[in-house]
Amino acid sequence: MQTIGVIGSGTMGSGIAQVFAQAGYPVLLHDVQQTALDRARRGIEASLGKFVDKGKLGGDDRDAALARIAVSASIDALAAVDYVVEAIVESVDAKRSLFKSLDAVTRPDVILSSNTSSISITLIGAATGRPDRVLGMHFMNPVPLMSLVELIRGQATSDQSMKTATDLTTALGKVPVEANDYPGFIANRILMPMINEAFYALMEGVGTREAIDTVMKLGMNHPMGPLTLADFIGLDVCLAILEVLHQGLGDPKYRPCPLLRRMVDAGHLGRKSGQGVYAYRT
């Protein structure tokens, strides 16, 4: 395993590129917009700087990690990579289109993984000629701090591909946990209904936003309340995952809360937009 290709330079893609670079892997970070790539490099540099400030990383190690990250706005540059992690928008059509392109650009032996938080790996893999080498590699946000990586096996994913992904996850200093290809996998199959119920409780006036979050923090020992967490994840992402759960499982208990849908329609997406359940400085 040599160069890692990471596609998508948003919060997740940048974090994934950073942890691979910190672990000693050369990384090629691809995005269609050069401005997004420039912003990602600044964000990675700032993130690594925080580790240095806290004494968790030396200055030389920071510089070495940054030097391992190359960027390119051309998908053709991915022809040279040995493993791919996709971290683009949570859209099945966008992912299938991208994986079809990756199938043509990358070597036939390269594993193509997706950071999707809910979309079927089987469906994504079917867009390629190598479904045995397609799997889910779902990192948690923020990637540099969270130790879990959920590995998802599609219908055709080979044992060898899963072993490669497992070994790679361990080499990053993270903990791999395997899940089968059901909507939402393990993490979001459990997390998103809780967040959704918190929105129903808010909409129905069961408690204020502060009360709901405080009950879950102090009563259930959660590090942050579900509404604060939803703002952190992105309300649009939460809605997209709930829609996958609702459509894929057909159970009305996964129906997205109308308040959540209304907030997304209004552009109140959480921290990234400056306004969600709570207001943030942008």
Image (cartoon, rainbow, N blue to C red):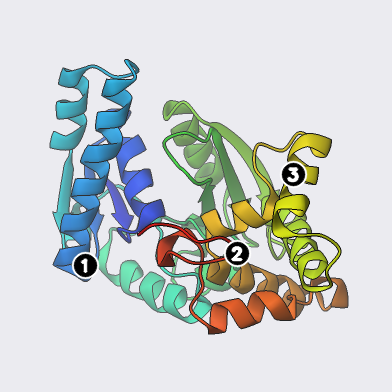
Could you tell me the amino acid type at mark 2?
Answer: Val
Could you tell me the amino acid type at mark 1?
Answer: Ile
Q: Secondary structure at mark 1?
A: helix
Q: Which mark is residue 277?
A: 2
Q: CA distance from mark 1 to mark 3?
A: 45 Å
Q: Secondary structure at mark 2?
A: loop
Q: Which mark is residue 214?
A: 3
Quadrant of image for the C terminus: bottom left
Q: Residue at x 55, y 44 (%)?
A: 162
235 sits to left or right of 144: right
Can the viewer see residue 1?
A: no
Quadrant of image for the N terminus: top left
Q: Residues within 10 Å of mark 2 (few under 14, many from 20)?
A: many
166 sits to left or right of 202: left
Q: Nearer the viewer, residue 213 or 100?
A: 213
Residue where numbered disc 1 is placed: 75
Looking at the rendered image, the disc whose residue lies closer to the viewer, 2 or 1, is 2
Q: Residues within 10 Å of mark 1 (few under 14, many from 20)?
A: some
Q: Position of residue 45 (x, y in %)?
A: 21, 39
Q: Position of residue 63 (x, y in %)?
A: 14, 28
